[in-house]
Amino acid sequence: MFVESFRMALRNIKSNKMRSFLTMLGIVIGVAAVIGLVTIVQGVTSRVMDEFSDLGAGMMSVSAPGTALKRGLTESDVETLRAIDGVEGVSPNLSTTGSAVKNREIFDNVTIEGDDLSYFQRNSSMLEEGRIFNASEADGNTYVCMVDKTFVTKVLNGTDPIGQTVRLNGIEYTIIGRLGANNSMMSMSDTSNSDGTVYLPYRNVMHMTGTAQIQSLEVYTKDGADSSAVESALRAALDRIYNNADNAYAVINMESLLSVMDTVSGMLTTMLGGIAAISLLVGGIGIMNMMLVSVTERTREIGLRKALGAEPRRIQIQFLMESILLSLIGGAIGIVFGLLIAFIGSSVLNTTFRISYGAIALGAGFSAAVGIIFGWMPAKRASELNPIDALRAD
Amino acid sequence: MAGDEILYMHDICKDYVMADSVLHVLKNITLTVRKGQFLAILGPSGSGKSTLMNIIGCLDVPTSGDYWLAGRYVADEDETSLSHIRNREIGFVFQSFQLLQRQTALENVELPLIYANMPEKKRKERAQECLEMVGLSDKMDNYPNQLSGGQQQRVAIARAMANHPSILLADEPTGALDQRTGAQVMELFHELNDEGNTIIMITHDSKIASHAKRIVKILDGVISEGDTSDA
Ligand SMILES: Nc1ncnc2c1ncn2[C@@H]1O[C@H](COP(=O)(O)OP(=O)(O)OP(=O)(O)O)[C@@H](O)[C@H]1O
Ligand SMILES: [Mg+2]
């Protein structure tokens, strides 16, 4: 019964090629829009999210310029923050510009960064050569440093940096490691005319600059710790430190940023999907229209089929099959076009093109649903035609 | 009821309710048709022939009265079983042929077999057999518009016979044909009747009706038996 209905449906679609095509077009556009837009949005979001989580999953960055009474944070404040439940480590970020002397040559434009050991442990992928300093070397009285590639090129003339010594602001340091590109958000500044960067334990930088204030730091949460609980504990501690003064500090929680982005992208997907779904709806109405015309045109045929013994159910299935087939073919073409749009879109936006099976399932499901929903009424009408009236119709 | 009664109608009435009046189209019709009979229902235009045929063919229901067809009380059946009755017990032949224009002669003959759920191979064989029977074995793949009127009506007869119906029910089968082709169709009816098929033919033409072995006259919805020479 289904095989025959399928054949008859196919025959009818074929015999009205132009009309079938135009009707299908609505579904094609709707499905292509759903798939194209959803895939593009998902591609963009997943790229942005990847970048964000590379930068700071499990990390909060704190900037604490402080108040007129109390500028920045002291070492003991940092210790207080380290003691918070769920905090794995706190790394002050200090940065200054200084001079380096090597082989009697002076380089004035050296960026000097001071971070805690935990910073380098977290960003261990930065290390390309040698080692990072250990806990005992981080006391502020040991003079070891890591350098970046620019420093090796400009100051060391490209020689192997490990084990060499260099004078930084007058103090001799031993180079123990070389670091690659820095992923940290805190040091994204472009330094094309710089003489490179050296990385020191942050206490060394505090001594070097003679400051006791820390204005910028990163707080790392333990794996599995509740990020928002840690954040509120952190804020409470900072409030205590600054006596509840307004605007003394700011905390950016990467995790909550990520979840906000997740929400936004979800909303965007829903919204675009909704807009595309409206075009599917329009396509569905097109199908219903065509099916109603088709039922009217074929009234005589329906009457004859009934006279020859077609059950009402069979007539209904035949017409329903026709509308489902019509919208499924449209859906299939739409999926192909949608993926094409997504592919072009992702290469234009420079995001990775990932076939979203969810979107394909959505497109196929939607078009089948449209076929059933909008084909139902015309099919029902056909099945209920009175054969005498139908046979008499002209 | 005797065992060879294929159709039995008792006191069948059909009224059409109009805006301001009721039209009594069929009035207390009682009719028995036995297996193997060739019956003509003869009457002028508007006498209620088609209305009667629609009731016989289970396309329409009477306003009152009892109707048994092939042992079944028709009023008790729902739409779905009525379509099964039409499929198995009735073979329709219409004045205007009623062939599907987009399908070949063979496919047209296959239609009732499809609705009887006959497997494809068997169905094709049976359809070919029926077309051979009406002398159209060389026209099976022709579309209706590639056939003459007489040929089209023979395709329609082949289609009507495909499912071995209890009754071949023909409404003005020669109405759209000229005398010669009409005579050919009558010839075919005789052959089919000689093979034992029951035929009910509706016509307003007494010459055509004279081909039948039994004539029932209908006038203003009332039937009367004509000259009876029971087969
Ligand atoms: N659906 C209907 N509603 C109202 N009146 C109807 C309907 N169908 C038929 N009639 C009336 O019933 C009467 C009989 O009609 P019917 O079609 O049975 O005549 P007929 O004998 O077949 O005539 P013809 O030889 O012209 O085909 C006619 O007067 C017709 O107007
Ligand atoms: Mg008539």
Image: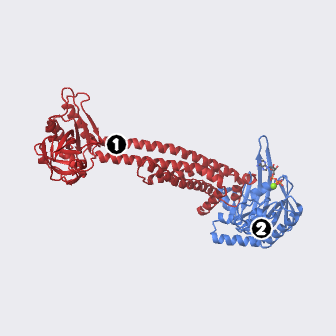
Left or right: A167, with A265 as reference point: left
Q: Position of residue A116 (x, y in %)?
A: 18, 44
Disc 1/disc 2 C-alpha distance (Å) = 81 Å
Q: Which residue is mark 2?
A: B198
> Which of pointers 1 and 2 indicates the residue nearer the eye?
1
Chain the render paints red: A
Q: Secondary structure at mark 1?
A: helix
Is residue B70 among the parts visible in the rendering?
no
Left or right: A101, with A342 as reference point: left
Q: Which residue is mark 1?
A: A259
> What residue lies at 25% left-to-right and 27% top-to-bottom?
A246
Mark 2, residues whose alpha carbon is within 10 Å: few (<14), some, or many (≥20)?
A: many
Quarter-of-image position of residue A61: top left
Q: Position of residue A313 (x, y in %)?
A: 62, 56
Looking at numbered disc 1 in the image, what kind of residue is underneath it? Ser
In this orientation, which residue lies closer to the viewer: A96 or A219?
Answer: A96
Q: Colour of chain B?
A: blue
Q: Are marks 1 and 2 in contact (CB under 8 Å)?
A: no
Chain letter for mark 2, please. Answer: B
> What residue lies at 88% left-to-right and 60% top-to-bottom?
B205
In the rendered view, would you say B84 is above or below A31?
below
In the rendered view, would you say A340 is above or below B152?
above
In this orientation, which residue lies closer to the viewer: A321 or B93?
Answer: A321
Q: Secondary structure at mark 2?
A: strand
Q: How is the image coloured?
A: by chain
